[in-house]
Image: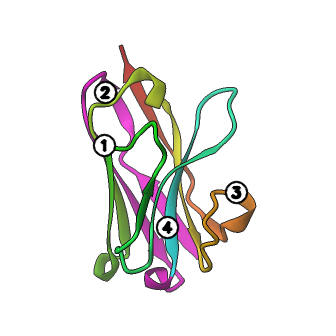
Amino acid sequence: VQLQAFGGGLVQAGGSLRLSCEGSGFPLDYYYIAWFRQAPGKEREGVSGISSSGAGTYYVDSVRGRFTISRDNAKRTVYLQMNSLKPEDTAVYYCAATRIYRGNYYVHEYDYWGQGTLVTVSS
C-alpha cells in the first residue's frame, strides 16, 4: 500500500502549484482522500478533501476559492490545484486516505498517508 504525494516546490506569492497524490496497492476509488498540511511549529491541519466519487468536496476557510481538489480514479490520482498562493500556505503537504469518512480531519481516522511534499511560498 502506498500513497505518493508530489508537486511541491518554491513559488512566489500569487503563484500556482498543482500537487498530485498517487495511490497503489489498495482500491483508491473506494476511499475519501484528504490533503493535510503542517507548517513548522504547528499542528497538522486538514486543508481539503474529496469523496470517492468526486461529487463531494471540502475546503478549509483559509483556502476556499483559491484551491481546487479533483480526482481521476482511472489514474488512481488526486490533485490539489493551488492558486493565489500566500506565504502562510508554506507547509509540508500530505495526502491521506480513509475508507470511512466521518466528517472529520482527525489524523488518526486516516488509514494511509503519503510522504509529504514541501510547498514554500515566498513573499
Q: Amino acid at mark 1?
A: Gly
Q: Marks 4 and 2, how far apart in space?
A: 25 Å
Mark 3 / mark 1, whichever is N-terminal: 1
Q: Amino acid at mark 4?
A: Ile
The crowding category of the residue bearing disc 1, from other C-alpha atoms within 10 Å (few below 14, some 14 to 19, many at least 20), is: few
Residue at mark 2 = 11
Q: Marks 2 and 3, how far apart in space?
A: 27 Å
Residue at mark 4 = 33
Which residue is at a point 35% across and 74% down the rendered structure image? 54
Mark 4 vs 3: CB contact within 8 A: no
> Which stretch is magenta?
1-30
Mark 2 vs 3: CB contact within 8 A: no
Q: Amino acid at mark 2?
A: Val
Question: Foreground residue, 103 or 44?
Answer: 103
Report the mark closest to the observer, 4 or 1. Answer: 1
Element under disc 1: loop
Q: Marks 4 and 3, how far apart in space?
A: 12 Å
Mark 4 / mark 2, whichever is N-terminal: 2
Q: Amino acid at mark 3?
A: Val
Mark 4 / mark 3, whichever is N-terminal: 4
Which residue is at a point 43% across and 28% down the rendered structure image? 120
Q: Marks 1 and 2, how far apart in space?
A: 19 Å
Q: Marks 4 and 1, how far apart in space?
A: 19 Å
Task: Say above or below: 28 vs 90.
Answer: below
Report the mark closest to the observer, 3 or 1. Answer: 1
Mark 1 / mark 2, whichever is N-terminal: 2
Residue at mark 1 = 65
In this image, 112 relative to 16: left or right?
A: right
